[in-house]
Image (cartoon, helix red, strand yellow):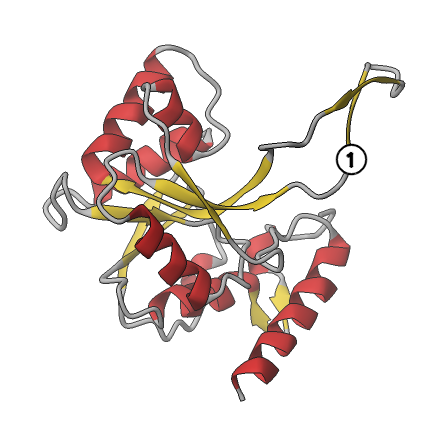
Amino acid sequence: MGASRPKQYLLLGGRTVLEHTLERLDSFAPVRGIAVGIAPGDPYWPTLELHTPKLLGSFVGGAERAQTVLNGLKFLDGRAADDDWVLVHDAVRPCVRHTDLFRLLEAVGTEPAGGLLGAPLADTVKRADNDGRVIATVPRDGLWRALTPQIFPIGVLRHALEGAIADGVEVTDEASAVEHAGRRPRMVAGHADNIKVTVPADLALAELYLACQAAESD
């Protein structure tokens, strides 16, 4: 992002990206509690004036995504059981729609492998070498972009993350850990405006999407 602060604390329409994201989750009726993973010594988190009644608190993240999520599951010890469901969501996806969250819950149901929001690939996909030269065109049938939230029973996700870490497997999302454990999470189609704010242009795009979504609900 090239910014002076982490991207979740950049302003989006006068409020931080993280505040928008938390508001989306807090206002989603099935969510019973929210926990936020933050970096050690994060100076920005304490300065936020949050209006999220379902916020349980924050926990310290790890060096890698898998460890951060595992720390979050440990934070929930005593607050939730292994057979309760947990949604894991990127802090920098402020545009997730409630309709997509409902679709995810409905599609996953009681499947023990859980599931995740995603978007089928529409573009032609190329594989390139280290010099940037195309070496193959990859068939896109059955290929998806993985989004968040991703949802799993707490016990299933904890076991999968611990196993992946022990095996030295790179975990790029929670579903990859569950896949490594031999399960097959369900892909659920979500809206393409559920973007991950990663580069400067994404801020303007996210602001546009939020405005469009607000207009749709008027």
Q: How many discs appear?
A: 1
User: Which residue is rendered at x = 46% and y = 29% of the image?
Assistant: 64
Looking at this rendering, what residue extends furthest in the bottom direction? 218
Question: Which of the pair 89/153 is nearer the observer?
Answer: 153
Residue 26 image point, x, y percent = 34, 68
Residue 149 image point, x, y percent = 42, 49
Question: Which of the pair 199/120 is nearer the observer?
Answer: 120
Q: Tag 1: Cα neighbours inside 10 Å, few (<14), some, or many (≥20)?
A: few
- State whether residue 172 is above or below residue 75: above
**Residue 14 shows up from this direction:** no
Question: Which of the pair 106/2 is nearer the observer?
Answer: 106
User: Which residue is rendered at x = 13% and y = 51% of the image?
Assistant: 79
Looking at this rendering, what residue extends furthest in the top direction? 167
Amino acid bearing label 1: Thr
**Residue 111 shows up from this direction:** yes
Horizontal relation, residue 11 to residue 113: left or right: right
**Quarter holding residue 92:** bottom right
User: Which residue is rendered at x = 45% and y = 33% of the image?
Assistant: 65
Horizontal relation, residue 178 to residue 204: left or right: left
Residue 179 image point, x, y percent = 39, 24
Question: Which of the pair 106/22 is nearer the observer?
Answer: 106
Residue 82 image point, x, y percent = 14, 38
- The residue where tag 1 is placed is 124
Q: Secondary structure at mark 1?
A: loop
